[in-house]
Image (cartoon, rainbow, N blue to C red):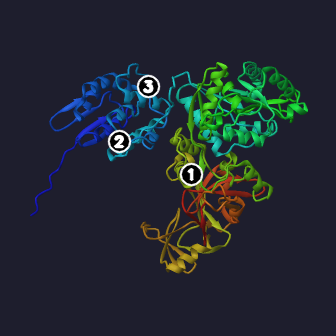
Amino acid sequence: MAPKKQVVVLTALTFNPRSVAYSFGMLANLSDVKLSYFVDDEIDAPVMKSETETITGFVEVAQKLKQLSESELQFFKKIIPLCYTAPLLADLEEILSAEVPEEPTMETYLVLGSPAVVDCEDLSAYPKIQALAAKFEKNAVIKASKGQVAVAFKKYEQLQAKSGPTLPHAEMGKVCTRFPPEPSGYLHIGHSKAALLNYYFAKKYEGRLHFRLDDTNPAKENPDFVQSIQNDLETLGVKYDTMSYTSDSFQMIQDLCESMIKKGQAYCDKTIQAQMQQERADGTESAFRNNSVEENLRLWEQMKIASPEGQLTCVRAKADMQNPNKCMRDFVIYRVVLNEHHRTGDKFKIYPTYDFACPIVDSVEGITHALRTTEFLDRNEQYQWICNVLGLRCPYIQDFSRLRLQYSLMSKRHLQWFVDQKIVDNWKDPRFPTVQGLMRRGLLVQSITDFIVSQGASRRLNYQEWSKLWALNKQYLEPIAKRFHCVLEDHVVMTLDNIEDKIIEVPLHPKNKDAGMKKVHISKSIHITKADLEEMQKTQAQKVTLMNIGNFTVNGQVLTYLPGDTDFSNTIKLTWLPNEEMQKVTLRYYGQLVTKAILGPEDDFKNFVNPNSLREFTAYVQKDFLTHCQQKSIVQLERMGFYYVDQVEGGVILHYVPEGKKQCQVGAFAFDEE
């Protein structure tokens, strides 16, 4: 007999992942100690336990894992207590996925996951650490690729999901975030991410959310969208504490621009747009860059009155034409717009660019954290430059990736094309990614909130799958949606034998008493969907189960009740309706508007329009269906899925709610769910 395999008991390392989640993994990678990881979010200090000893404390554990030099030990003693109590970074996963060394050194490890490192006063004795700390302060990230680190991070993630994402440099009670949409369209799911993240962090840190309408371009704005955006925020459950318009600050912003001109920090430029773009790309200074202050002020006055000369002029920041970041090459901060503004009328003829107005208003309005999508990454330097030049407090910039979903268009211009072509009814069509469109498709606010918050303020750029969001949505619908039977238009009549005609009461949800009860009429003849009869005939079923009643034997279209038979394990389950007046309903199934998951920059979306993005079926439910549900509620038609009650007057219309499956079945028809 073969000898038993010797069981190796690994040293157990227990740590609090809310502090330094995977630093131990990094350290273990540099040592010969094999570890088994455990997490405990209530302990104050890490514990390493082997068969022979138990060691407690970060420094003590580190010494055991690796022989530290005296300088490293001193660094540990100074830094580690700070590391262990430091707040988590907003997106710790990025630290594990970026650029730096494949084989991290001890010094690299020390910086990993420790915002507190940059606060250490005396790093002069450790030049490598000092260099890394300086990079870390500028959002540098550190790569770790070995398996033990991945295990530690995975376990960290499990606990992170309980507490939610965090915000760097956030003080309880002092955080102020903002949501600054432009009033030029309806909010879509991408805007929802920004709104919900800002709201989440404001609540998490007992701070406030400021709602600002960025109305700096009167050529694009429509006052009607102001109310629609407010309605969308209300739908999302986002409650803001204060509200303003950028236009409230137009005079102040204009005065600040004028002060920059007087100080030689900005100049007026009449270069045509195409030439200006080329010069910025080449790093070539404008012929107007060295205008006198007097000439710049003269042109500035011409801009204010929108004279012919003024209309050819813009104001540019005198920044750095040799900066490798081309966004810093004398960017435009003011221009003439002749359209009347929806709030200020014709008072102003000149308007600030978003890039100029945003940091000014953020600072003045007390914003502490400016959450911006990664498309603004190159312009973060602009933001900080403007604050510094004007002597304004600079809010902390937290970047996050845009929410991008497969098979989806977010461009207003593209979506408007579908409206103009009458492919969709309007901007609230369930095929649109707008807030109202998604609500009409049965997406719950809780689902989209959890989906977005689970990602946090991550900078990872990837396309999400709709199926993940709909699968999450289904989890919330399962315990609350009232359940009903339904038959399609091509139904057939079946005769019931050995059962009396009666009315019974059935729970509207078998596991939710609060849903209430419904009356079900068991009649001598019933309706079932034709496809179900065909399935019975195809399989030569001898026995079937009528849901809410029991088992029946099959003889053609006559079903005989088996009152003592409770074995439902291998029977075909049938939904049915009594042979009496029924409520007619229209079932609508919406697909994606385009057939390609990810459209490339060279793709014309018009070549990928889905010709079958809407299917309709006529069906029937019990006659008192509308006494148990109302418009905008979501019900479950058993064996057919969940449905959003979109319309009750003038005909009942139900919208199918995707469940994250590849296909859905309606009678004999099967098609892609999305």
- Marks 2/1: CA–CA distance: 26 Å
Q: Which residue is drawn at 46% across and 41% down?
A: 94
Residue 464: percent from left, percent from top: 55, 51
- Marks 3/1: CA–CA distance: 34 Å
- Marks 2/3: CA–CA distance: 24 Å
Q: Which residue is drawn at 85% across and 30% down?
A: 349
- Horizontal arrangement in the rendering, residue 328 relative to residue 336 (left or right): left
Residue 308 can be seen, yes or no: yes
Do the CB atoms of the residues marked 3 and 1 lie less than 8 Å apart?
no
Name the amino acid type tagged 3: Val
Q: Name the residue under label 3.
A: 118
Q: Mark 1 points at which residue?
A: 463
Name the amino acid type tagged 2: Ala
Point out the tag, 2 or 1, that comes first from the N-terminus.
2
Which quadrant of the structure image shows residue 71? top left
Residue 306: percent from left, percent from top: 88, 30
Q: Which image quadrant: the N terminus?
A: bottom left
Front residue of 234/524: it is 234
Point out the tag, 2 or 3, that comes first from the N-terminus.
3
Residue 664: percent from left, percent from top: 58, 64
Point out the tag, 3 or 1, that comes first from the N-terminus.
3
Q: What element carries label 2?
A: helix
Q: Mark 2 points at which residue?
A: 152
Name the amino acid type tagged 1: Tyr
Q: What element carries label 3?
A: helix
Residue 525 can be seen, yes or no: no
Question: Around disc 1, counting alpha carbons within 10 Å, would you say few (fewer than 14), some (14 to 19), or many (20 or more)?
Answer: some
- Horizontal arrangement in the rendering, residue 183 relative to residue 201 (left or right): right
